[in-house]
């Protein structure tokens, strides 16, 4: 039997080239778990598009909820078939979002019931730049937990912004490298 969560076989989404996919099955199971438990998240945002595979996955969730999905990247490296499959509720924004807090990102993040997925070039910086703009009851997730970003990197921001861990026990069980918090 294939271990879908193992590091080797994890990147299988849509049968596409695994080198162009940033998230593993554990991450997508975790996202599915979150949206199945909480139907209030309406506006989906991703920081770091890369090949756009995770974007299409989250964009479909947004589409099913009749809502929008925004994804930001400094360059457009979307796989051609992903670009061809882009849905009309999905918006790709080519921007450098790390120089300082980017106005177009802020405009999205300041909405109600945000699902924010941070997966960009400098996760600690992105977390610090954008989390303060989230409203109460919005959620933020980071990818590559304990690899590119750790508790000690963001402990002060978590405190200052009243962030409470969000189903992180399930993230661990599913071998996801995502961790989430809800703003209270
Ligand atoms: C880890 S990849 C994203 C993976 C993607 N979320 C996925 O699941 O497949 C990180 C992305 O951050 C982008 N990036 C790096 N620095 C950036 C910056 N200053 N502004 C915007 N995007 C940046 C890179 O171009 C790259 O595509």
Image (cartoon, rainbow, N blue to C red):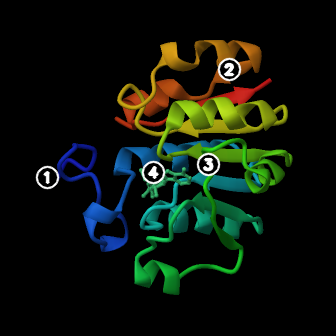
Q: Which is more foreground, mark 2 or mark 1?
A: 2
Work out whether 85 lies above or below 143: below
Q: Of marks 2 and 1, which one's residue comes earlier in the chain?
A: 1
Give the numbered dot on residue 28.
Answer: 4
- Residue ID at (31%, 72%): 16
* Residue located 52% across and 54% down the image: 48
Q: Earlier in the sequence, mark 3 or mark 2?
A: 3
Within 8 Å: ligand 1 and the Cβ of disc 4?
A: no
Tag 3's secondary structure?
helix
For label 3, the residue is 36
The disc, 1 or 4, on the residue closer to the chain's N-terminal end is 1
User: Where in the figure is residue 26, as x and y percent of width and height?
Assistant: 37, 44
Labelled disc at residue 164: 2
**Label 1: element kind:** loop
**Mark 3–mark 2 distance (CA, rounded to whole Å):** 19 Å
Q: Secondary structure at mark 4?
A: helix
Q: Quadrant of residue 87?
A: bottom right
Q: Is mark 3 within 8 Å of ligand 1?
A: no
Quarter in which the C terminus is drawn:
top right
Left or right, residue 155 beside residue 103: left
Which is closer to the viewer, label 1 or label 4? 4
């Amino acid at each position: 039997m294939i271990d879908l969560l193992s590091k080797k076989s994890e990147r299988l989404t849509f049968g596409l080239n695994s080198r162009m996919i940033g998230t593993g099955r554990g991450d997508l199971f975790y996202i599915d778990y979150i949206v199945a438990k909480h139907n209030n998240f309406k506006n989906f945002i991703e920081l770091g598009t890369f090949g756009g595979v995770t974007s299409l996955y989250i964009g479909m969730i947004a589409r099913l909820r009749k809502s929008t999905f925004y994804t930001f990247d400094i360059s457009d490296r979307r796989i051609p078939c992903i670009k061809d499959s882009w849905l009309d509720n999905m918006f790709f924004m080519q921007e450098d979002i790390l120089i300082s807090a980017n106005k177009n990102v802020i405009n999205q993040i300041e909405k109600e019931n945000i699902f924010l997925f941070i997966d960009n070039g400098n996760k600690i910086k992105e977390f610090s730049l954008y989390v303060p703009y989230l409203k109460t009851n919005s959620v933020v997730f980071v990818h590559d937990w304990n690899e590119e970003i750790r508790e000690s990197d963001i402990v002060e921001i978590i405190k200052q912004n009243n962030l409470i861990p969000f189903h992180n026990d399930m993230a661990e069980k599913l071998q996801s490298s995502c961790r989430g918090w809800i703003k209270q």
